[in-house]
């Protein structure tokens, strides 16, 4: 067990502000964040400001923002949830992976629709 | 003749006897006087012995114990001789010497015991510190793999334990336990903040003239430890609803000053005097003097003050509680190189903020230091928007970067048309009124696959800010058609496909009711 490259100076949990869970609906790490046109209030923290600046040119996912901000995705979720709650960001759930549709389900749906007539 | 002789003899005899009797009387008197003297001397000696015995009893039962108590409780009274007149100077001095000798012996023994305790704690805390550092490293790795917020909490608990252990080690004359590089002062303050329970109440205000002001490597971690102790005091002794303002500023004499205020209960005069004595950096602090449980905060700061040359002062605060001021002398300060980026969490300097910064501006048109500061989080302080853009893209990957530069070159070739405007001004801000609103069409969606002129693979990249209203799609199309022959860029392809999609959506929504019914029928028929 090697100790790694020194002790980091600023830990990621600082952005949580002492909360144990994000205050709001949980965001997936692939959720897409979109900046709205609202102005940030003057008391906004530096990290929230940076996140908004990052999103100003266009949408990014949570995990991409995390990489840009050099934070873990779990900590970025806290930031994003706050900004979504205050209306400065919009969050869109990730696009689900396209999967095979269960054939039997479609068949049952078809049978049901036919039986309606 | 004979009677004369007889008479003479008788006179002589009587004189002789008279003299004898006188002598005998005188001897008797002298003897009695001597006896009386001896008696008095004996009584005096007895009284002296008694007094001396009493003094020795006083020495054994009161003075030495009191002197020993006074070593740990400075205000405890030390009784002197019982009755100073009864014992002569020599004995009194010797008795005082005995007290002094006892004091010295106790002090030496106390120092020895304390040193033994310190070395034992030093060894233990060094081991615990190393273990906690390792677990911190593991937690750091876990945070990047899993999104569970409990890992963050665990990291915080680990950090708290690490601070206590490190403070104990420093108190026991140990090395801070790790070496850092030169570190920005603001980051050190934030690092100290993160080590304190109740860190969410601490508000750091950055008033530095030079944002990249940093501490030299050897003083970085000691300053973080000292500040963490001061902040821990401030949060521990103030109400949980109050904030703890921390101000970082530069002093006139090229030093730096960190103020930690609290709106807490304050300190009484004795405690303040004691705290100032500890903060002045005494040469030795004994563990036994710190109370039970030991109040280590100021003592730790005092140790670091003595060893690294900081200055710390504490006084009543205008916020109601106490204000701790820690001054870092100029010889411990330096300025970070430009290639070291500051943490995103580092608060920006509060003065001289560019006026338009609130809306996330500072775009392509290089607004002096405004742009540089807004990008410090992820780029070197770039000159203009294009460079910022380039370094942003650099993170995303080489392909994207090449695409971006291609686009930029194309923009230059066509003389500042829409695509050039999009790429050139797509810094972290809104483009300043692009000549053509085409690239600003709703670009929030991901993915595109237009055939780009560059051989680069199609890849994800950030686009112009979402500013154009949806009705701008019409002019977008005309602008698109006019320049179709010149170039096809990802933005333009995306815009045209968006316009197409919007058109088809509009068409469908215009004829929704019949379409849905026919759909139903179609389904039924199949």
Image: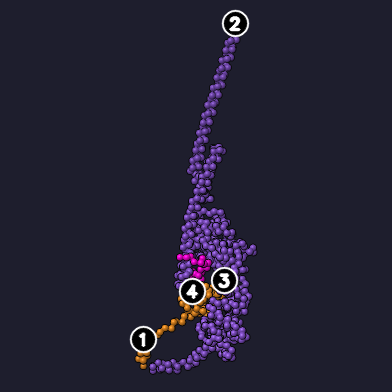
CA gap, disc 1 and disc 4 = 38 Å
CA gap, disc 1 and disc 3 = 56 Å
Residue A7: say if magenta: yes
**Chain identifier of the residue bearing label 1 in the image:** A
Count neighbours of disc 2 (C-alpha within 10 A) and say few if under 14, some if 14 to 19, many if 20 or more.
Answer: few
Chain letter of the orange region: A
Residue named by callout 4: A73
CA gap, disc 3 and disc 2 = 147 Å
Residue numbers of the magenta segment: A1-19
Whether the residues at callouts 1 and 2 have beta carbons within 8 Å, the answer is no
Considering every residue shown, the one lying at the far right of the view is B252
CA gap, disc 4 and disc 2 = 154 Å
The numbered disc on residue B2 is 2
The numbered disc on residue A104 is 1
Q: Secondary structure at mark 2?
A: helix
Labels 1 and 3 positioned on one and the same chain: no
Give residue B63's position: percent from left, percent from top: 51, 44
In the image shown, does A99 or B166 lie closer to the viewer?
Answer: A99
CA gap, disc 4 and disc 3 = 20 Å
Residue named by callout 3: B341
> Does label 1 or label 4 sit earlier along the sequence?
4
Q: Secondary structure at mark 4?
A: helix
> Does label 3 or label 2 sit earlier along the sequence?
2
Count neighbours of disc 3 (C-alpha within 10 A) and say few if under 14, some if 14 to 19, many if 20 or more.
Answer: some
């Amino acid at each position: 067990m090697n100790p790694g490259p020194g002790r980091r100076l600023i830990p990621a949990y600082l952005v949580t502000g002492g909360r144990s869970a994000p205050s709001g609906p949980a965001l997936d790490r692939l959720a897409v964040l979109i900046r709205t046109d609202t102005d940030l209030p003057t008391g906004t923290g530096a990290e929230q400001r940076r996140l908004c600046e990052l999103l100003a040119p266009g949408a990014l996912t949570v995990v991409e923002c995390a990489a840009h901000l050099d934070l873990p995705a779990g900590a970025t979720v806290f930031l994003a949830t706050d900004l979504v709650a205050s209306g400065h960001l919009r969050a869109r759930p990730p696009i689900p992976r396209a999967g095979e549709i269960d054939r039997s389900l479609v068949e049952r749906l078809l049978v049901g629709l036919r039986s309606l007539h | 003749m004979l009677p004369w002789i007889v008479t003479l003899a008788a006179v002589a005899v009587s004189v002789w006897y008279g003299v004898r009797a006188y002598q005998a009387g005188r001897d008797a008197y002298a003897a009695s006087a001597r006896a009386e003297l001896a008696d008095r001397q004996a009584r005096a000696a007895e009284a002296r012995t008694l007094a001396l015995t009493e003094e020795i009893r006083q020495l054994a039962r009161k003075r030495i114990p009191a002197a020993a108590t006074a070593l740990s409780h400075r205000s405890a009274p030390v009784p002197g001789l019982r009755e100073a007149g009864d014992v002569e100077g020599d004995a009194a001095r010797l008795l005082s010497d005995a007290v002094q000798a006892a004091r010295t012996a106790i002090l030496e023994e106390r120092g020895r015991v304390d040193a033994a305790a310190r070395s034992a704690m030093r060894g233990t805390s060094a081991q615990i510190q190393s273990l906690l550092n390792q677990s911190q490293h593991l937690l750091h790795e876990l945070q990047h793999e899993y999104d569970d917020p409990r890992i963050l909490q665990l990291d915080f608990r680990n950090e708290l334990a690490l601070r206590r252990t490190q403070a104990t080690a420093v108190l026991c004359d140990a090395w801070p336990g790790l070496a850092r590089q030169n570190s920005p002062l603001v980051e050190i303050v934030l690092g100290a903040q993160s080590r304190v329970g109740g860190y969410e109440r601490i508000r750091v205000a950055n008033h530095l003239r030079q944002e990249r002001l940093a501490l030299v490597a050897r003083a970085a971690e000691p300053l973080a430890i000292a500040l963490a102790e001061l902040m821990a005091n401030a949060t521990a002794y103030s109400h949980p609803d109050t904030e703890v303002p921390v101000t970082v500023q530069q002093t006139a004499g090229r030093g730096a000053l960190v103020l930690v205020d609290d709106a807490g209960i304050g300190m009484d005069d004795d405690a303040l005097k004691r705290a100032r004595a500890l903060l002045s950096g005494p040469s030795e602090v004994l563990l036994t003097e710190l109370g039970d449980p030991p109040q280590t905060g100021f003592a730790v700061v005092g140790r670091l003050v003595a060893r690294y040359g900081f200055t710390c002062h504490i006084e009543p605060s205008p916020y109601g509680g106490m204000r701790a001021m820690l001054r870092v002398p100029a010889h411990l300060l330096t300025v970070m190189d430009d290639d070291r980026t500051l943490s995103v969490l580092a608060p920006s300097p509060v003065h001289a903020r560019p006026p338009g910064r609130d809306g996330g501006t500072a775009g392509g048109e290089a607004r002096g230091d405004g742009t540089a500061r807004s990008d410090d989080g992820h780029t070197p302080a770039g000159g203009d928007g294009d460079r910022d853009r380039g370094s942003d893209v650099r993170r995303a990957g080489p392909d994207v970067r090449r695409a971006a530069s291609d686009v930029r070159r194309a923009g230059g070739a066509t003389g500042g048309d829409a695509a050039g405007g999009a790429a050139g001004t797509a810094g972290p801000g809104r483009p300043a009124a692009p000549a053509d609103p085409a690239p600003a069409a709703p670009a929030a969606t991901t993915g595109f696959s237009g055939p780009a002129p560059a051989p680069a693979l199609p890849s994800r990249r950030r686009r112009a800010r979402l500013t154009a209203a949806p009705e701008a799609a019409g002019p977008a199309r005309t602008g698109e058609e006019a320049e179709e022959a010149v170039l096809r860029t990802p933005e333009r392809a995306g815009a045209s496909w968006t316009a197409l999609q919007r058109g088809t959506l509009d068409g469908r929504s215009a004829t929704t009711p019949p379409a849905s019914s026919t759909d139903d029928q179609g389904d039924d028929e199949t």
